[in-house]
Image (tube, rainbow, N blue to C red):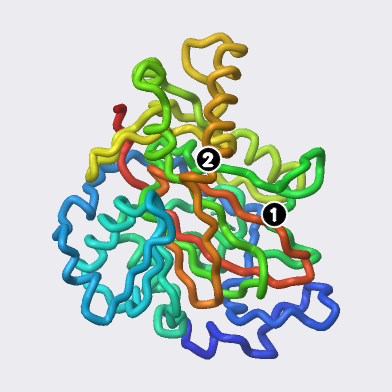
Amino acid sequence: MAPSVAELTNNENETPTNTTFVGKPKLSYPFYFPYYDINEKFPPTQLFEHSDPGARADPAKPHLLTANTTAREISPYIGTEITGIQISQLSKEGLDELALFAAERKVLLFRDQDFKDIGPERQIEIARHFGPIQRHPTSGNVKGYPEFHVVYRDPEHDHFRDYRGRDRASGVSWHSDISYEKQPPSTTFFFILDQPGVGGDTLFLSQVEAYKRLSPEFQKRLEGLRAVHSAVEQAAFSERRGGPVRRVPVESEHPLVRQHPVTGEKALYVNQGFTRRIVGFKQEESDLILNFLFDHIAKGADFQIRATYAPGTVVVWDNRVTAHSATVDFENTILRHAVRLTPQAEVPIPA
Ligand code: SIN
C-alpha cells in the first residue's frame, strides 16, 4: 500500500537515530533513508524488448511544454532548466515528450516539485514508463522499494566514501550509471530531497558533443570498436566494506560509439567508472585510447554543465548520451539526500 504523506515527510519520531550529527539530522523525507539487507539477493537481469517512449513523442511537445512552462538553456549543448511543470501530473503523452526532450537536451532540471504530491508509487510508475527499473546490486535502497537507489551522506553513512579519501586528489568520478548492464539505462530520474545550501552539485557532460570534437579520422577508428564495462569492482568494493552484493556482477561489451535510437545522434560510450578495456586490443593499447578518451571528456568544460539543486529539484538525464559526477565538496555533517530511479533501455546500438 502507498505510504501516506505523513509517512513521507519529516516526523520527529521517525527520524533515524543511528546518526551522530551534532544535533540530530533532520531528514525532510526519512521514509527514503537508505536501507541495506546484506542477505537480499536479486536474480540476474533478463533481456527485454525496448521501445523508446521518445519515438512516440510529438516533436512540438504540447503535453510537456505548455503556456505555464518556462525553459531556460543552461549551455548550448546540454542542460535546460524548467519551471511550471509538476512531473507527477504529466500524462503518458507528456512523459513521451519528456523522453524526447531529455534526449535532445541531455539533462533537464525540473524545479519546485511537490514530493508529497508524488510519493514512491507514482515515482516508480513514472520511471517505469521509460523501461524496467534497475535494482541496484550494491547501493542503499528504500525498505520495501528496491527500485530506489539512495544517495545519502552523514558521518556514519557516506554514499561517497569511494569518491573521497584513499589515494585520490580529487573526488570527481565521471561515469554513466550502471553501464555494465546488457541494457544500460536511458531517461533517469534523480529526486533531491535534502541539499546543502552551497555545494553538492552534479557535473554533467554531453557525450554527443565530446564525440563531435574528435577528428573524422579518429571517429572512424573508434566506430566498430567495443569495450568491456564491468560491475566487478563495484561489487568487490561493497563486499570489502560489509555491504550487499545482491547479484552476481556482470560484464558487458558495448560499442565505443553508440547511436541514440530516437535522435540518431552518435555519442561516445566510455566512462572511467565502469569501462575497463577495448575488446581485441592489448592492454597497453586499450589503456592508451581509453585514457585519452577519459581525459578528453573530463577536460571538456565547454560541453559540461554544473547542475545546482535545491530541495524539490528533479533532474532527468539521458544516460545514453551523458556522463556525470557528483561534487563532494560538502562536509559529511551537512545533509545531502537524494533518490534515483534508473529505467533500462535498449541494447546499445553501434554507430
Ligand atoms: C549519481 O551518480 O547517480 C548521483 C550523482 C550525485 O550524487 O550528484
Q: Earlier in the sequence, mark 1 or mark 2?
A: 1
The residue positioned 59% from the left and 32% from the top of the image is 295
**Residue 301: x %, y % from top left:** 54, 45
Give the answer, above or below, for where 176 lies relative to 296.
below
The CA distance from mark 1 to mark 2 is 23 Å
**Residue 1: x %, y % from top left:** 42, 79
Residue 12 visible, this angle: yes
Give the answer, above or below, for where 323 lies relative to 120.
above
Establish whether ligand 1 lies closer than 8 Å to the Cβ of label 1.
yes
Q: Contact, CB < 8 Å: mark 1 with mark 2?
A: no
Quadrant occupied by the C terminus? top left
Secondary structure under tag 1 reads loop
Give left or right: position of 175 versus 322: right
209 vs 195, nearest the viewer: 209
- The image quadrant where one finds ligand 1 is bottom right
Establish whether ligand 1 lies closer than 8 Å to the Cβ of label 2.
no
Secondary structure under tag 2 reads loop
Residue 1 visible, this angle: no
The residue positioned 73% from the left and 45% from the top of the image is 170
25 vs 201, nearest the viewer: 201
Kind of residue indicated by mark 1: Phe
Kind of residue indicated by mark 2: Gly
The residue positioned 60% from the left and 19% from the top of the image is 287
Give the answer, above or below, for where 129 lies relative to 274.
below
Which residue carries the number 2 mark? 300
Give the answer, above or below, for where 122 lies relative to 265.
below
Give left or right: position of 103 versus 110: left
The residue positioned 81% from the left and 38% from the top of the image is 167
**Residue 18: x %, y % from top left:** 78, 73
221 vs 259, nearest the viewer: 221
User: Residue 160, which numbered label?
Assistant: 1
269 vs 346, nearest the viewer: 269
